Amino acid sequence: MDTDGTHETRPPRAGHVPRPAGPPPQGLPPKPSHAPTAGPTLGDWLRHPRSSDGPGVWTYGHVPRAAEEPEETPTRQLISGALISLLAGLLLWSLLWNGYLGGFWLWPLYMFTPDSWAGTLPSVVASYIWYAVVATVLIIGFGRLGRWPELARRMLSSRALRAVQPAHSADATRPEAGGPDDPARWPQLRGAGLGDVAERLEVEAGGGRMNDVDYARIRRAWDSVRVDPSRMRAFADAVRDKGAAACVHPSGARDLPVRAARHDLLARQVLLGTVEDGVRNPYSRRGTALALDPDVLGTSLLAVGPSGTGKTRQLVRPVVESLSLQALAGQAAVVAVGAAGAQLGPDAAFDVVVRVGDPASVYDLDLYGGATDPDEAATLLAEAFVGDVPGIDVRRAATALAQLLGPFRVAYERFPAVPELRELLDGVPTAFDALRRDLTGQHAMLRELDARARQHGAPADPGPALADRVALLDRPAFAGFFDTTGQGRPFSLRALEHPIRVRVDLPERGHADASRMLARLLLAQFNAAAAARTDRSLFAFLALDDASHTLTAGTVRGVQRLRSAHAGVLLTLRTLDDVPEELRTPLLGAVGCRMAFSGVTTWDGKRFAEAWGTEWVETRDVTHRTVFADQPLTRLMHSFRKLVTGKAVTTDAVTVRQVERERWSASDLAHAVPPGHAVLSLTSVRGERAAPLLVRLAGTS
């Protein structure tokens, strides 16, 4: 149990059993890059109960709470009530014992006691028994009247009792170790007749040769076998041969070199923080741990906060790390885009690292996103190049680009490189003449090229604006990049059908405009590639560490369609002012998860407040009225009380009513969110919603 009240789930690793020095045995998980930490074994981690009562709940060891806060009587009121009932009970017993109320309470004793017992020992014993019965009835009656049991629970360390009770209730649902439902024994494989395969995996886990990624990866492979039984033999042979290393990721990696967050791969969650235990949060979520998973990330997430509030360290990095682990388990494909040096993870944690503008970069970026259709490629480029330019129709720009890309591809069986595209957009005669010569006999393509030549220089021609934007990429720093001749190693977002981990570093420092244009291009390509996948079993995700000036009307519409494509995006902004004003409301409506970090402005807070809406709350209005006495003695007492207390004697009139108020006002978001906190609302792909929650982010003291 962590100090913040949440259970810590560390990746189960080898190291619990001492091993001899020397090279590690074949098949062990990779050596961790950090010191060993105490944590559960793989079996304990698998058997730990998980439950959820809403989106964003960290299911590991979660115990649901009541929906409403129980009404709790103040302790002082309980004590006073108990004393009054005790005094009343003693008074009644004294009156009965001394005969002030008569002897009616002794009639049952006289009725059931024989007359022959008078003055004998049995008569004395029967009398004291009856006295004890009457005293017990009085104690029970006045005890219930004075709420003595509740006071006893309150005074005798009730907090400790409540802390122990959830642990027992959680253990009640815990599978028995070695039992038929023990997940560490792979009951699903045994039920399918693969007992020897299950035994091999059980031995691997018991010997410390299997980690959480291995378990999630093999379980994912088994799920694919259940869908296609023809793969069962290959699956069984692979497990018998390689054990926990079976069905490994194409990179051969079985874990990340370092983990900066806490993950639960069984639930595919990453721990983000803890919901504050305060009146601003619903009672059922107070003090619970909050996590993100593909179920909520599939509706996309927008996070807004000024620089230095921890958007990268406390949000983007953990989410990218979680999806990278899921990619190693064959469950997801992730692309992280940020400025060079954005600390999105080490190079070894990714399969592809594209450093745009760095001559040492191994991979290049496909400017056309792997598209083969000129119209599709033109649409993506137009969205990236001029989608943010006011007054330019993106459709006209796409048409202008298609009039060049189509003929060029027919002539050379490839799309133009950046310098070639710039010459064609500028209308350089030699470039047009060379292309016409190579299109001899292609009347349809020549007609497209002639149409572009006629439109060049017209008042509404988007060609000059496109040429200016292409010129941002036709710089010496990008020489050798965006190659279309097949000599480089371009990365295309068409690879989202594979469990790939990609990081793209943009040259934000020296080429800010080009970086923003490339970010727009990657977002447009991701929207198109995610929707065009034939196999959507993998969760595709794009994380933009800085989405400033990258959103257009087309990309916002594309984000809305990602939910049905089993994909999502994470967009972070310093302020909503970095988005065109006409897109701020559609953007907040397009994403299902919204996050406001501490320090946002009231202008940004107003947009979030409108998106989160209002709720009905109960308010109490207290009116103080001065009491004027008519009797001389009463006036004297009131004057004496005012002299002692310094306040006039008043009465309180309480008015209770239901009013509609904003869940979080703009002022509250701007001034009432402490540093290291954020207000987060979640929506799952199934439509479940979590009201805005004030969350203390992980790593915040």
Image (cartoon, helix red, strand yellow):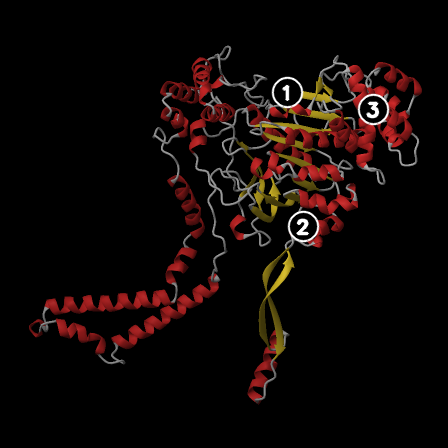
How far, Cα to Cα, is label 2 from label 3? Answer: 43 Å
Residue 481 visible somewhere in the drawing: no
* Amino acid at dot 1: Asp
Q: Secondary structure at mark 1?
A: loop
Q: Secondary structure at mark 2?
A: helix
On-image quarter of the C terminus? top right
**Foreground: disc 1 or disc 3:** 3
Q: Is residue 146 left or right of residue 75?
A: left
Coordinates of residue 128 in the picture (x, y in percent): 19, 67
Which residue bears the numbered disc 1?
A: 351
* Amino acid at dot 3: Leu
Residue contact at pointers 2 and 1, CB within 8 angstroms: no
Which residue bears the numbered disc 2?
A: 611
How far, Cα to Cα, is label 1 from label 3? Answer: 34 Å
Which residue bears the numbered disc 3?
A: 404
Q: Quadrant of residue 203?
A: top left
